């Protein structure tokens, strides 16, 4: 399934809580080009996850429309895969069985593929790509946090998504693992042709990975700045020293300062 | 490493048990306690061998009551738990009542059951069932409700249908808790069967104990207690073994025992 343009028009989301209605998203307007890597940064509670849930079809907006291609969004659909902040591996399944879960739920078999590779072969290739060759028979509890999140990324990729949604996927990892995961993610992005929407609260992470960074305001969230990141790919450790990289980071930090999200004492 | 630790622990437990029996024997001999007050371990073992046919026959009856009662609890407890978890009415109105009912000692309804069901084996099975039913249903409900919201979001994003959410996510997640209920349930089923036999019966270990008691046959009473201990311990360990085989990820995740 080829990646399609995503159009978000006047999207609003208000939650009904006991303390009255809470507006999480206020009139978001966006067009996301196919195959682009777009990050959304913003402070906690700004509605980034709400936006992602809407794009994943896990929630329904209270106003506006979301179009994928030219069809309105209706629930979780084929071609979309989600990676959550928690790895959400099923503890009772081996690593391989966890990666194969989407196939099992949708009854996908090797007969559904032109090249006739088996499900197992696909899963093993995927694990190999993220450096987990030979870990297929292990249970999740035997893996470190970074390894577990890699497995959950494999579980998303095996669906061969045209849109990969990632909700702070590295948020629970230590700084070094996090950095390594970024390099790995770029490798994956290069190999799999898909649109990536990446939610994070790390400015550096957003700039490093993306073609475009959307900066969100505190609640009710809206996009206050839309920054195209003009850095060469492939990106690597040197990119982080690039003056342009630092410039983008400074620019976004400035936006947060003007929003009152960041302040020097 | 772990195996050798388990072996060492097993040795230590056995040695302690044997030491306890030796001490018991010694106390009886040194203070020359008459066997109609406290028989020595050797008295008990001798008697168990001598009367093994009687003991085994009555054990068989009690074992059947325990297993039948427990099986009924599992058979009804788990579907009932599923209904409670999926139905708002049952979870909000029936489940609290069930929990409240748990505070009523099930044994107290034994005389009623005899009135209704007679003196036969059915009454005993029913009591074993009623007493082991509650821990199984309660822990199954707790287990089935333990699925996190995020997990449900994952299932939804993978386009799992309701049945798949249950079979792939909710049920496996509940299994450790369900097995916890089984372990409590099987122990209580033993209690239920024996107490039911105390109330009225013409066979079974509870009956044997009452007869021995009325004859002031202390040794026989100890034999019955030993048999009950063996039955209880064996059944508990069988459930534990099944759990270990069925949930390799669970035991191991918690570092063995």
Image: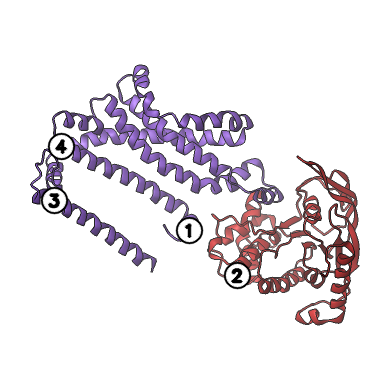
Chain colours: A red, B purple
Q: Which quarter of the picture shows residue A209?
A: bottom right
Query: Which residue is depicted at the point 73% across and 60% down?
Result: A160
Residues under numbered marks 1 and 4 in contact, where contact means CB atoms less than 8 Å apart: no
Residue B229 in percent (x, y) is at 27, 43
Residues under numbered marks 2 and 3 in contact, where contact means CB atoms less than 8 Å apart: no
C-alpha span from label 3 to label 4: 17 Å
Q: Is residue A244 visible?
A: yes
Q: Which residue is the extreme one toward the top?
A: B115
Mark 1 or mark 4, which has the lower sequence index?
4
Q: Any mark on residue B218, and which?
A: 4
Q: Quadrant of the C terminus of chain A?
A: bottom right
Report the residue marked by disc 2.
Answer: A132
In the image, is residue B158 above or below residue B182? below
C-alpha span from label 3 to label 1: 42 Å
Report the residue marked by disc 3.
Answer: B27
Where disc 2 sits, the SS reads loop
Q: Which quarter of the picture shows residue A213?
A: bottom right
C-alpha span from label 2 to label 1: 23 Å
C-alpha span from label 2 to label 4: 65 Å
- Is A106 left, or right, of A221 in this rendering? left
Q: Are marks 1 and 4 on the same chain?
A: yes
Label 2: how many Cα within 10 Å (few below 14, some 14–19, many 20+): some
Label 1: how many Cα within 10 Å (few below 14, some 14–19, many 20+): few
Say which chain tag 3 marks: B
């Amino acid at each position: 399934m080829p990646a399609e343009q995503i159009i978000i028009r006047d999207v609003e989301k208000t939650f009904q809580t006991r303390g009255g209605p809470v507006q999480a998203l206020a009139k978001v307007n966006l067009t996301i080009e196919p195959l682009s890597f777009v990050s959304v940064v913003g402070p906690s509670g700004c509605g980034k996850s709400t936006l992602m849930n809407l794009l994943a079809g896990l929630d329904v907006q209270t106003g506006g429309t979301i179009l994928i291609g030219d069809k309105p969004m209706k629930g979780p659909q084929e071609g979309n895969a989600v990676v959550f902040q928690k790895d959400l591996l099923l503890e009772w399944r081996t690593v391989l069985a966890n990666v194969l879960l989407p196939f099992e739920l949708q009854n996908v078999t090797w007969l559904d593929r032109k090249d006739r590779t088996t499900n197992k072969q696909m899963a093993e290739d995927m694990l190999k790509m993220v450096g987990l060759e030979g870990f297929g028979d292990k249970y999740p509890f035997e893996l470190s946090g970074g390894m577990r999140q890699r497995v959950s990324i494999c579980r998303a990729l095996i669906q061969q998504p045209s849109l990969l949604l990632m909700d702070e996927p590295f948020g629970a990892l230590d700084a070094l693992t996090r950095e390594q995961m970024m390099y790995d993610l770029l490798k994956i992005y290069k190999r799999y042709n898909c649109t990536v929407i990446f939610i994070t609260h790390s400015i550096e992470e957003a700039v490093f990975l993306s073609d475009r960074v959307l900066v969100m305001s505190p609640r009710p969230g809206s996009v206050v700045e839309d920054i195209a990141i003009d850095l060469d790919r492939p990106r690597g450790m040197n990119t982080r020293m690039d003056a342009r990289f630092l410039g983008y980071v400074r620019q976004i930090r400035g936006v947060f300062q003007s929003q009152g999200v960041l302040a020097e004492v | 490493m772990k195996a050798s630790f388990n072996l060492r622990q097993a040795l230590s437990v056995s040695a302690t048990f044997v030491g306890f029996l030796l001490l018991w024997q010694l106390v009886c001999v040194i203070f020359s306690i008459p066997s109609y007050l406290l028989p020595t371990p050797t008295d008990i073992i001798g008697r168990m061998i001598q009367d093994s046919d009687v003991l085994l026959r009555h054990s068989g009856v009690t074992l059947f009551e325990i297993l039948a009662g427990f099986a009924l609890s599992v058979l009804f407890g788990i579907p009932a738990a599923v209904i409670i978890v999926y139905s708002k009415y049952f979870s909000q109105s029936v489940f609290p009542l069930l929990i409240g009912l748990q505070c009523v000692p099930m044994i107290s309804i034994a005389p009623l059951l005899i009135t209704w069901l007679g003196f036969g084996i059915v009454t005993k099975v029913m009591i074993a069932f009623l007493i082991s039913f509650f821990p199984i249903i309660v822990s199954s409900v707790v287990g089935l409700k333990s699925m996190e919201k995020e997990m449900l979001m994952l299932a939804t994003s993978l386009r799992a249908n309701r049945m798949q959410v249950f079979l792939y996510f909710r049920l496996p997640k509940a299994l450790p808790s369900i097995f916890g209920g089984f372990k409590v349930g099987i122990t209580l089923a033993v209690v239920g069967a024996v107490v039911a036999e105390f109330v009225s019966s013409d066979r079974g270990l509870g009956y044997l104990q009452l007869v021995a008691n009325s004859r002031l046959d202390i040794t026989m009473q100890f034999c019955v207690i030993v048999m009950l201990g063996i039955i209880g311990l064996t059944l508990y360990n069988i459930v534990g073994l099944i759990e270990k085989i069925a949930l390799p990820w669970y035991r191991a995740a918690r570092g063995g025992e």
